[in-house]
Image: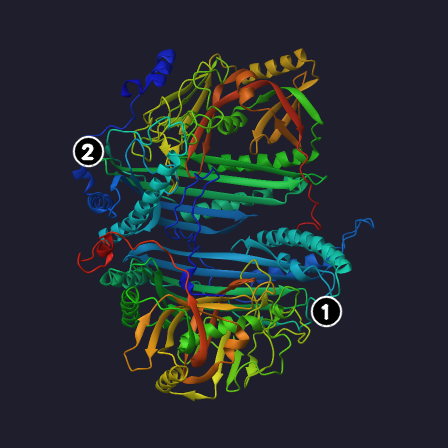
Amino acid sequence: MLIPDSANPVTREIFRGQKRIPAGKCLPVLAILPVLLLCLPAAGAQSAPSPLLEAMTSELHRAFTSLGKQPGQTDADKQTPPYFISYSVSDSSFAVIRAEFGALANSVSSRMRFADVQVRVGSPKLDNTHGNHRASAVQAVQLPLGDDREALTRSLWLATNAEYGKALDNYLRVETEEQVRAKEEDTSPDFSKEPSQVHIESAAPPVEIDRTAWEQRVRALSKIFREYPDVYQNIVMLTVQNQTDYFVSSEGSQVVTPHLSARVVVLAVTRADDGMDLFREQTFEAEDVAGLPSQATMEAAVRELGKSLEKLRKAPVTQPFDGPALLSGRAAAVFFHEVLGHRLEGQRQRGDQEGQTFTKDVGKEVLPSFLSVEDDPTRTRFDKTWLSGSYQYDDEGQKAQRVDLVSNGVLKTFLMSRLPIASFSDSNGHGRAETGHVPTGRQGNLIVTSTKTEPESDLRKELIAEAKQEGKPYGLYFEDISSGFAVTTRSSPQAFQVIPLVVWRVYVDGRPDELVRGVSIVGTPLAALKKIVATGDKSEVFNGECGAESGTIPVSAVAPAMLLSELETQRQAQGTARPPILTIPGAPAATASGKEAAQ
Amino acid sequence: MSRMRNLPTLVGAVLLGLCVCAPCFVAAQQTRADAEKDPVLNAMLQELDRSMSQLQLKGFAKPFFIQYRIEDVEGYQTKAEFGASEGLVHNRERVARVTVRVGDYKIDNTGAGGDGAVALESLDDDPIALRSALWMATDQAYKNALAAYAQKQAALKQVQTPPQADDFSHEKPVVMLETPPKLSIDAADWVSRMAAISGAYRKDSAAKDAALQYSRSEFDARAITEWLATSEGTIVRKGAAEYRELIAVGTQAPDGMSLDRSYTSTGTSLKDLDAPDAFNKHAQNLIASLVDLRKAPLVEDEYHGPLLLSADADADTMNALLSDSVTATRPALGTQARTNGAFASSYQTRVMPDFVDVVDDPGLKDYGGKGLVGAFDIDEEGVPAQAVNLISEGRLVNYLIGRQPVRDFPQSNGHGRAGLTGEPHPEIGVLKITARNGLSDTDLNAKLIALAKDDGQKSAYYAETLGGANSPRLLYRVNADGTRVLVRGAALDDIDQRALRSSIVAAGKDLFVANYYGDVPTTVLAPALLLDDVTVRRANRKNQKLPFYPPPE
């Protein structure tokens, strides 16, 4: 599921003390109070060897050689030793500046360390992570900052001890369940054999930004919305994060990689008179703040958002439609992420609950032959655009690889973590997870390429021609898509839904294009993907965050514009609340439409 | 009706010879003009005026009451474990809570859900931004209020018994502008102090005997500035600060039983917190107590008889048994009840022995030189706090109440309190429990032994500290010769409202100050308490496996 960056603001409340919290009835306004942190004197770029890495390595070795091997145990009491342990530590320094309504709402910086401890008991063939037990195979713990060895190893010891207890319990259940259930369709092992990795880089530097200057920039971007009084709410947020990932395993892997990112997210919200909530968002990404676009560029983009929302709230609601459609590159990128990308994740090819749409299709044509799809986390840029989904090593310590998923329409492979499947036994460096989750095969930078390209102006002509041929008064042009979701479990239809933000009717009779609202794209993947008939000659990037079983991770999707001979839409779920009764403070009384609603 | 308003309080006052004192703020009469000099209040008042005069959905009622509350919260938090810091949190945010009422004071929209909305506010004193967040929340709160009012009207038609009191009390508007406290924290110093204290075990030879499994420390400080404006003309600026440091250590007994100890020092200023040496001494004592607890015998299967609660343990017990019981909240629609909770029907009856008095006095700012976090001058509904005699000579003579009246209690006594962004509700401030003829610890102990003897018991029990209701952390078996044996694994039963009424034999003369750091900070001052019939039994919690392998050297 792809979520625009801004749709997922931090929503915890601070300082909820230990006393009972009065049951605040119905206070659903906004996400408030992100808990954020102030930086400690930072450790700075570490000179090798890192004391943290050394503490992780030695404590892991001690755990691996101690667990299940304690003397003095009776046979009955004897514990199964682990066959694999890994420690994965993320040490991140970050700054967040947030503005709303043209003023600063939050400005903080922080540094935190978290460790994920994984313990595997049994054997690679069958272990405690089998089947539904996978999610329980990790223990997350906050680690002290600094280099104090005693404190670091003690924390790791506590977490390892807890995780080992859980692993023993789960392994016992797995063994029993194996005895009582029918033979599984996919009898692949639970853990792939991979070479150990040693790759040690310098730690990421702490985040250093000119806070006052950036506060002013973020504030100024938010203030632009005062020119658009019908934009009821806006959030502009700068997030700068410099993270170092440390990974050690009982197989001998030692990986230290830095990962830097800077992102400005602009979210703007309005509501149509019929109660439909409408929003637009725009993000700017770079490796660091210096790489972000100029203020003038961002201001221009924010004005575009404001204008587009004011138009959108007045646009007519369109009816369900089944006919030709043109997706912009950005829209096509989200479409591919949802419709194809999620179904090519390795773990979805095994398990009794999975729909397994493409499991048996390796070597078969799943897309028109002019399309190819790769996932390449090693790539950090597409043209000049920085890609969010890039990384050097995945969260299982495996080297990131460019993977050709579909070549000339033919399915070649899947996105593999260290969970083998019947057709593929090895990881291809796509085992990804948010802290506290067990990694699974996930997308990084999904890139769709085409050999049948034409200028977008030609695609538009073809859209009109196609609509005419089908006897439709218009075709639909999807300019921007916010997000979507894909259902891959067997118990539900193998459907997808994506929520467009900006949709135009392109009329066959030469009338000007008409902006409409209120539809979402629905369909089933096998049918929809085969309806692509041509693509544009320019690709666009969608940077966002993707949420699934292994948590929320940054991803990118890149695709050219695409013409589909048929696409189905349905009415979008919508709110029913009226727009605000009074105009937003500061608005010239006559301009905003809020007043009209009151009459 | 207004003639009756303070009758219960006055009865208590006459009996006790105490005065129902006005809140302790003195200042030249402040006015709206003074408030308008504050940019936050000025923005609030402008938007409040606009909403009151213009906010109306065609065909529906205008609001009859709007309240804006903005809270500016600055907080520091630093945690450490095993001798090293996990980092420092420093955050500052402003949040707004908007309450809109439609209908009238007799019947309004409240009680049917949705009587407010919250929004993140601007940190800049930018009038447009400040007003925008209020505008958005007001719009939502008004729409919610209209929907709730319609629902309430429908619900009222379903019941034969009408509501027993009005929905909203009339109170005199107040303008009160305080200078709120500012946090002044040497953050780096607290980071290193917490790191050091969480590592105290490393220099303590007892730690090895304790087989210590965790050692955590935390320092919290927060200051809140609160601005309040109502359509009735109340304008308030006030502030509060609270500080806390704590250390928690734990291990397992050889049979797997979890053993946990913690110590917290809480106050309204940094000087209320323990000096580093004193705090360190507490940390050492906690570790030493783990060593003792590991060796301590299990409590016997079951015991019924006398028990002495230390003042510390009694403060937690009183907080659990009294704090919610003495507040008056609106009963379910259609019933004839006065209020809810354990004391719902106890008005003017005996709820404690006749030598016990209980007062809630938010004006008590310190006690024994220690700042009380539960103290306040004016509540979150803009009503000045009053000292309220709740239990007089053992009889319940009053309730704590906000602006939501209940039968016979038509006015607020200034106890409508709220946590961050929360809806005001009656809550204790500084709850003080005192006993006439209170005894010294020595006398209480002697009385405990005597009681046990009369009861034919070989021994009795003394609870020194609790770790949550009814679960003692330090519990001693007291022998007839006065010697004490630490035991573990106990749970206390039968310490309930009935025990308050009929099981209390004696109480101490010294009060323990329990400051509860939290969303709505509260304080309980309580004496030691001797109960004659309490059950002590095995807690029988699950004993987890001992560590699978030893901790690192």
Question: In this rendering, would A50 be left or right of A212?
Answer: right
Question: In this rendering, would A447 be left or right of B374?
Answer: right
Residue that label 2 marks? B30
Label 1 marks which chain's residue?
A
Residue A67 seen in the figure: no
Circle 1 SS class? loop
Label 2 marks which chain's residue?
B
Q: Is residue B487 above or below residue B437?
A: below
The type of colouring in the image is: rainbow
Kind of residue indicated by mark 1: Thr
Of circles 2 and 1, which is in front?
1
Residue that label 1 marks? A187
Question: In this rendering, would B279 be left or right of B37?
Answer: right
* Mark pair 2, 1: CA separation: 79 Å
**What count of labels does the image hold?**
2
Residue B378 drawn at (x, y percent)? 31, 32
Kind of residue indicated by mark 2: Gln
Circle 2 SS class? loop
Residue A388 drawn at (x, y percent)? 46, 71
Question: In this rendering, would B395 be left or right of B216?
Answer: left
Name the foreground residue: B120 vs A76.
B120
Q: Is residue B249 above or below residue A249?
A: above
